[in-house]
């Protein structure tokens, strides 16, 4: 700081000493100029010296700013902005991490296991599902449990046995029910090996008889007649309390 003070004083007094910073290329005959670059003809006042000094400092500051701006422009023109790398799908533009893996596909559910078949279900046969063509011959009674005597309700399950195969045409049960009859229900046949044939929907005849059209072949064997309303199934002592029923068909060769 102490070295700068004498230099400042010298520069301040230059206008009064007649010294100048002239143009060297102008030669000895060229015009003399002061520190501000103005033609110098005679000494100036102190106020004018201060003004010229301020002009000089301002020009130096402007030149410095212009040089710095030019340097910045040069750097900007020479710089290359790198192109950002393409982001993989699923990566956020500001997330440099590896994108998360795609979720695994949901496993295909295994089919539900088939419900267990009970022995009773396996014994059921839809005997009436495929009607057969009747063989040659005239239907005749295969069995009959019944008589013309007075009857009561509550007959037990009727049963019968055949020694050969029959094409069964129709099956009947009797529901006197004290003369009131009963709405037609269903009839089935259950063999001694546990297989159930039917049920078949019956028709009501004369208000007291249930009749079901079978039109199927029944293998030889022992069977029970299952009635959906055994409480009104007719019986008497002549049938030993067994419900009254009968069946018609044609024997198979």
Image: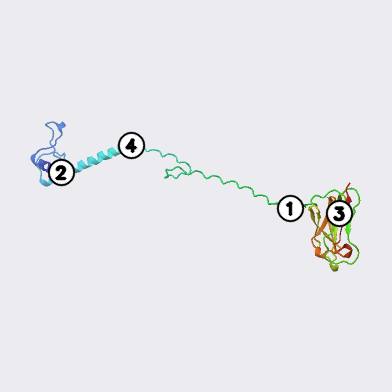
The residue indicated by pointer 4 is 77
Q: Quadrant of residue 8?
A: top left
Q: Earlier in the sequence, mark 1 or mark 4?
A: 4
Q: Looking at the picture, how far across and down is residue 171, in whole percent?
A: 85, 56
- Residue 116 x %, y %: 69, 51
Q: Mark 2 falls on what kind of element? A: helix
Q: Which residue is mark 1?
A: 119
Can you identify the residue that label 3 sits on? Answer: 161
Depth check: 80 or 14 in front?
A: 80
- Look at the numbered disc 1 and give the secondary structure of its residue: helix
- What residue is drawn where x is 89% and y is 58%? 144
Q: Nearer the viewer, mark 2 or mark 3?
A: 3
Query: How far, Cα to Cα, is label 3 from label 4?
Result: 113 Å
- Sequence order check, earlier mark of 1 and 2: 2
Residue at 25%, 38% (x, y): give it: 67
| Cα–Cα span, label 1 and label 3 | 23 Å
What residue is pinned by disc 2?
Answer: 53
Residue 83 in the image, given as x and y percentages of width and height: 40, 38
What quarter of the picture does the N terminus occupy?
top left
Direction from residue 222 to residue 24 in the image, left or right: left
């Amino acid at each position: 700081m102490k070295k700068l003070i004498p230099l400042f004083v010298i520069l301040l007094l230059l206008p009064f000493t007649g010294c100048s910073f002239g143009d060297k290329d102008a030669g000895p005959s060229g015009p003399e100029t002061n520190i501000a670059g103005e033609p110098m003809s005679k000494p100036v006042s102190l106020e004018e010296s201060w003004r010229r000094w301020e002009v000089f400092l301002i020009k130096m500051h402007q030149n410095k700013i212009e040089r710095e701006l030019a340097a910045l422009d040069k750097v900007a023109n020479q710089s290359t902005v790198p192109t950002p790398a393409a982001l993989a799908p699923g990566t956020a533009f500001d997330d440099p991490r590896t994108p998360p893996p795609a979720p695994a596909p949901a496993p295909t559910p295994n089919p539900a296991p088939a419900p267990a078949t009970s022995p009773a279900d396996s014994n059921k046969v839809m005997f009436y599902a495929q009607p057969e063509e009747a063989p040659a011959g005239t239907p005749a009674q295969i069995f009959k449990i019944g008589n013309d005597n007075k009857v009561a309700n509550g007959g037990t399950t009727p049963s019968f046995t055949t020694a050969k195969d029959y094409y069964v045409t129709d099956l009947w049960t009797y529901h006197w029910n004290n003369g009131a009859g009963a709405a037609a229900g269903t009839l089935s046949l259950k063999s001694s090996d546990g297989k159930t044939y039917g049920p078949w929907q019956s028709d009501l005849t004369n208000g007291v008889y249930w009749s079901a059209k079978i039109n199927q072949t029944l293998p030889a064997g022992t069977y029970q007649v299952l009635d959906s309303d055994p409480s009104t199934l007719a019986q008497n002592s002549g049938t030993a309390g067994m419900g009254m029923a009968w069946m018609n068909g044609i024997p198979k060769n």
